[in-house]
Every structure is written in C-alpha cells, then in structure tokens.
Amino acid sequence: MRITGSSVRSLRMTDAALLERALELAERGRGTTAPNPVVGAVLVRDGEIVGEGWHERAGRPHAEMVALEAAGERARGAALYVTLEPCAHYGRTPPCADALVAAGVTRVVAAVGDPNPETDGAGFDRLRAGGVTVELPGGDVEWRARVQNEAFRTWVTRQRPFVTYKAAVTLDGRVTVPDSRWVTGEESRKRVHELRSQVDAVAVGMGTVRADDPQLTARGVGAERQPRRLAFGRGPLPTGSELELVEGPLDQELRRLAREGVQSLLVEGGPTLATSFLADGLVDKLLVFIAPTLAGSGQRWLGELPHTVELLHVHGERVGGDYLVTAYVREP
C-alpha cells in the first residue's frame, strides 16, 4: 500500500515514535499477509517522513519496497524505521536489503530481527556490508514487535502453530456454574468470538464436543473468515458435527497443521485438554477469563501437571463484569 501526498509530512519525531508509526502501519496488513508476517516501514530524511508503507499481501511488495517507492530519490541519505529485519533472500519478491543499499539508505532502525533460523541476521549483515548503519533499540518496542507477529514467529521457529489456551472460570477456578449455561458475561463471550475471527483454527476436546456440541464459529463480530474448527481426541464425532476430528499425538498433529498453513490455534477445551497441552509444553499464551462468582463445586479448569509452569508478561484487564488475565508461557 502506498502513502503519498498529504500523508508525507515534516515533523521531528523520536526513534521510538517512528517505530510506533511503523507498528501502526504494519497492522493495516493484519489478516491479508499470510503466510507472511505483518510489517510496517517509515523512511525519514532530515526530520521529514518521505515514505511509508506496509506489507499488504503475500506476493506483493514488502513494506520497505513500498516506502522506497513512495520516497523516490528522497530515500538517498534517509533512515528507515521498520518493524522486522529486512529480508536478504529471493522469494516471491527481491531482497529488501539489497534495494535499501541501492537506494542509498544510510541507517536502518529495526524493532526486531528475523525469527527464521535459516535467515536470521542475513538482512542486517547485507545492510552492514553495504555501508548501512543498523540499530536495534530493544526494550518495549522489541517486545511489541514480537507480539505483533507472535504466531508467525512460533510457526517458523517451532514448526507448529502458536497456541493460545482460553479458559472461562469462576473465582474459585471452576468451569461450570450451577443453574447457568455461562460462566462469564456477555462482553467476555464477545471477546472470545473476536479471538476466533483472528486465528487460523479453534479447537476443543471430545469431552466438550460430547457435552456441548459447540459450533466454534466467530459470530456477531463481522468476521471476514471462519477458522478451521477442530476436535482433539477419539471419535466418532456426533452426527451432523462440522468439526474436524484430530486423533493423533498432539505434537505430531500440531506439526501437520503447521504444514497446512495453520499459524495460530485457539484452544477452548476443558480441563483434560488444557492439562495435556500444558504438560506437553505446547501452550504459548494463556487467556483466563475470571467471573466474580464462587461456584462452590464442580470441575476445575486444570488438572495435575508434572512440573511448575512459570508465566511471563502477566497482564490483567476488566472485560465487562469479568477480569481477563493474559500471560505468556514462553517468549514469542
């Protein structure tokens, strides 16, 4: 996507602010770049933004190339602020690192390096060899860039989808409330539908299938596409079920799903599936919706684990009358 005319503006901005702008631009490609990551880029010369861009679709120009096109000759002597290390390999598009050197860009400030172990650092090496100064400021902007492409990063480094486990529980950790179909409130349930609309696949266990026969679709949130809907466990599925049965070992099935292009998986199953995924080290992120209710009895959301699981980057927020705790099991 190209930005020209009045969008090219003159103002003094810090490195952090320019990377913030690049992160904002990258989000414009959300949902259309697969299997590629979302990337944003900003070119600045003498305090003026001379070109901006983002990766719009696989096979289309990368963010850096879009920004270079918008800048034209003004790219010579400019600094590039980009959310991900410029590529150095030929794929469906030429290497961005070579184009930046040829255009005369003198400085590249990148939020984070390429996570692909086969190409990590190659873009930076190509830039440095061409006389370009490369800087990685780290800190909060690096974390935000990692989170922005957390699914892609896991997909390329671990050859499996990024797994988010979602649970809806009472304050005493139960997954059911007597005489109520729902544990959490309407706003929390809407958030779950939004999450479904943003991932490649949603899964539950066969226990949940037999008890609730869930649809697992994203409803009421204007979803442009529906995720693949999976049931882990032993069949058969109920008559008329539209879920895909997944019966093999979890790690093998996740690798198969990754080969089929599934980068992100939202697991909504009950305690058995939660415990299995966590015990096998296959959960990357936890989302626990907590209702201000004491059920007093019933099944807890997690069973016995063979080891302690340390959580990282724990964050809490109100969602309607509930409380959502987000935590990472590992760095994305």
Image: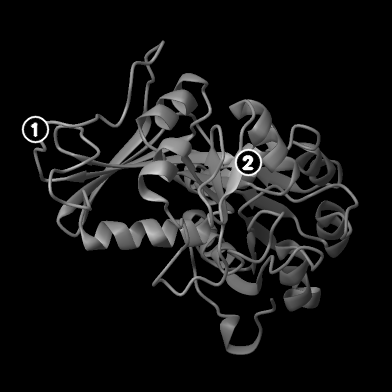
Q: Using the image as rendered, state which of residue 248 and residue 35 is in the foreground.
A: 248
Query: Up-down: is 20 above or below 299?
Result: below
**Residue 279 as seen in the image, left or right of residue 303:** right
Quarter of the picture containing the N terminus is bottom right
Residue 93 appears at what percent x and percent y? Answer: 87, 60
Q: Residues within 10 Å of mark 1 (few under 14, many from 20)?
A: few
Three-letter residue code for mark 1: Gly
Q: State how far apart marks 2 and 1 are (Cα).
A: 41 Å
N-term-proximal mark, 2 vs 1: 2
Q: Which mark is residue 153?
A: 2
Residue 78, image quadrant: bottom right
Query: Up-down: is 186 above or below 287?
Result: below
Q: Using the image as rendered, state which of residue 219 and residue 200 is in the foreground.
A: 219
Residue 58 appears at what percent x and percent y? Answer: 76, 63
Residue carrying label 1: 296
Residue 190, image quadrant: bottom left
Q: Which of marks 2 and 1 is in front?
A: 1
Residue 47 appears anywhere in the view: yes
**Residue 111 as seen in the image, left or right of residue 304:** right
Q: Residue at the far bottom: name it.
A: 5
Q: Using the image as rendered, state which of residue 13 and residue 58 is in the foreground.
A: 58
Three-letter residue code for mark 2: Arg
Residue 114 appears anywhere in the view: no
Q: Residues within 10 Å of mark 2 (few under 14, many from 20)?
A: many
Q: Are marks 2 and 1 in contact (CB under 8 Å)?
A: no
Residue 116 appears at what percent x and percent y? Answer: 73, 37
User: How many circles with numbers are drawn on the protein?
Assistant: 2
Residue at 66 percent of width and 84 percent of height: 4
Disc 2 is placed on an element classified as helix
Query: Up-down: is 215 above or below 254?
Result: below
Quarter of the picture containing the C terminus is top right
